[in-house]
Image (tube, rainbow, N blue to C red):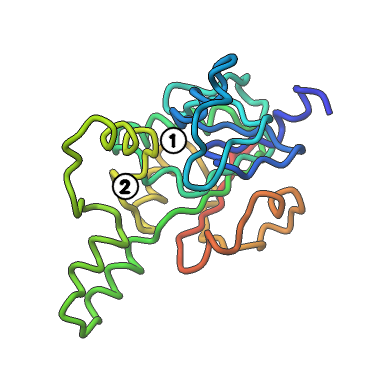
Amino acid sequence: MSSKAKTQYTQFGCGLCAPNQWLNFDSSPALLLQKLPIIGKLIPSGPYGRFPQNVRYGDVVKGLPIPEESVEFLYCSHVLEHLTLKELRQALKHCYQYLQPGGIFRLVLPDLEFMVKNYIHSTSSEAALEFMRITWLGKENRQRNLVAFLKEWVSGGQHLWMWDYKSLSIELENVGFKDIRRAYIGDSGISAFSEVEDPKRWHNELGIECRKLP
């Protein structure tokens, strides 16, 4: 498949999920290190393994190296919660620009509303502790040595801004997206999305589908 054809199906923040039918981007510093000549092979794998060879480095906030209106299907899974509010708004602008008229953007991320409801209705004395852990908004330990700090930086695991359906829908609408709806695993009716959608990453999470109208 040509690079031009691959651009039509694009995902960012792909991690280790990199189907050949898709153009796969990730902005992890670990990916950059692993792609260095010679020494890249010596870089340790992350907690989930090494990045596949067909994953390209790309930061959706700064802009992916793809043309505007070149993407038919766009996807990201558990990416947007790792961005600041300002970064998210810039990323969504880029997403809208990349899509062809009629193109579809599907995304999934932690559902803040679901987490808050669980916290409110919990009878556990450790409900607040559990809430901070599952939202990744708190830190149980402060990294005080360079090696630990670098590991944390490379992992990029901290959540910086959390979303519910109503608030993120407004952000999508503000950049021009239409037909915004809550989405569920496999409900797109499009077989290409089944290659990138992992049921485990959709369970009790917030899925959204929207499109760029012609």
Above/below status of 212 relative to 192? above
Within-10-Å neighbours for mark 2: few <14, some 14–19, many 20+: some
Horizontal and vertical percent for residue 77?
A: 52, 48
* Residue located farthest toward the top when viewing the structure as drawn: 37
Quadrant for the N terminus, please.
top right
Q: Amino acid at mark 2?
A: His
Above/below status of 125 relative to 18? below
Choose top left, top right, bottom left or bottom right for residue 198.
bottom right
How many labels were placed on the picture? 2
Residue that appears at 74% across and 30% down: 6
Residue for badge 2: 159
Horizontal and vertical percent for residue 122?
A: 24, 81
Quadrant for the C terminus, please.
top right
Horizontal placement of 122 versus 15: left or right?
A: left
Q: Earlier in the sequence, mark 2 or mark 1?
A: 2
* Residue located farthest toward the front when viewing the structure as drawn: 42
Horizontal and vertical percent for residue 76?
A: 54, 44
Mark 2 element type = loop
Horizontal and vertical percent for residue 27?
A: 47, 30
* Residue located farthest toward the bottom when viewing the structure as drawn: 123
Residue that appears at 72% across and 42% down: 19
Residue that appears at 29% across and 37% down: 84
Residue for badge 1: 175
Choose top left, top right, bottom left or bottom right for residue 140.
bottom left
Horizontal placement of 79 versus 198: left or right?
A: left
Within-10-Å neighbours for mark 1: few <14, some 14–19, many 20+: some
Choose top left, top right, bottom left or bottom right for residue 117.
bottom left
Q: Amino acid at mark 1?
A: Val
Horizontal placement of 170 versus 73: left or right?
A: left
